[in-house]
Amino acid sequence: DAGITQSPRHKVTETGTPVTLRCHQTENHRYMYWYRQDPGHGLRLIHYSYGVKDTDKGEVSDGYSVSRSKTEDFLLTLESATSSQTSVYFCAIRVDRTGYGYTFGSGTRLTVV
Amino acid sequence: KQEVTQIPAALSVPEGENLVLNCSFTDSAIYNLQWFRQDPGKGLTSLLLIQSSQREQTSGRLNASLDKSSGRSTLYIAASQPGDSATYLCAVQPSGNTPLVFGKGTRLSVIA
């Protein structure tokens, strides 16, 4: 199984502070994704990466930036956290083997107060 | 823009019942479709993936079908158990290089 870990698992931060969430994979899959999950909205794509230093925006990218300097790590940064960014954040990878699809991390619960 | 809809949003059934969860999508040109399960407070667990060239996939008591021409997929759960209680999410990958688009899920409760 593709290993994927997210850190931290929980975080409380204050409005206006920068926050960085980390996603780490143990294999070398090319595609990685950040989604947020909110009641009533389901899972929405924030940003994704298709290789080292190659990233693209999703439907809810405003206020977020990402970086991928190594294949195994994909970082999501909230540049100046707002209460509307209180959410559960999930990282996912697309397994580079036909028929396997996506694997998700356990999520980061972020609260902005 | 691909949109994915799951109806109903919630479903409650007695233990032992066979049930069908529905997923519809607006653009029939898809790469694949994946069903996930999510337990409260947890991440997503992949259940089944159907490639665009396939009609169905089976795993244990689960069977997922795909009808691209009508923009529909169903997840059939046989002999439901209380342990099947969870939210079931359907997601479509529009093309080989585009990310998954999710439905909002169906919350299933199986009552003992």
Image (cartoon, rainbow, N blue to C red):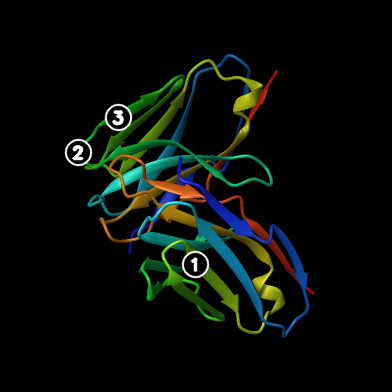
Q: Are marks 2 and 1 in contact (CB under 8 Å)?
A: no
Where residue A111 sits, quadrant-wise, is bottom right
- Residue in the foreground of this view, choosing between B26 and B49: B49
**What number is the disc on residue B53?**
2
Where residue A20 sits, quadrant-wise, is bottom right
Look at 51% across and 50% down and name the residue there.
A104
Looking at the image, residue A45 lies above or below residue B72: below
Label 3 resides on the chain identified as B
**What number is the disc on residue A33?**
none
Report how many numbered discs are placed on residues in the image. 3
Q: CA distance from mark 3 to mark 2?
A: 10 Å
Q: Is residue A87 visible?
A: yes
**What number is the disc on residue A74?**
1
Q: Are marks 3 and 2 in contact (CB under 8 Å)?
A: no
Residue type highlighted by circle 2 = Ser
Q: For mark 2, give the secondary structure.
A: loop
Q: CA distance from mark 1 to mark 3?
A: 33 Å
Looking at the image, residue B99 lies above or below residue B78: below
**Disc 1 and disc 3 on one polypeptide chain:** no
Dot 1 alpha-carbon crowd within 10 angstroms: few under 14, some 14 to 19, many 20 or more: many
Look at 61% across and 83% down and name the residue there.
A79
Q: CA distance from mark 2 to mark 1?
A: 32 Å
Where residue B100 sits, quadrant-wise, is bottom left
Q: Mark 2 or mark 1: which is in front? A: 1
Residue type highlighted by circle 1 = Phe
Dot 2 alpha-carbon crowd within 10 angstroms: few under 14, some 14 to 19, many 20 or more: few
Label 2 resides on the chain identified as B
Dot 3 alpha-carbon crowd within 10 angstroms: few under 14, some 14 to 19, many 20 or more: some
Q: For mark 3, give the secondary structure.
A: strand
Name the residue that disc number 3 marks.
B56
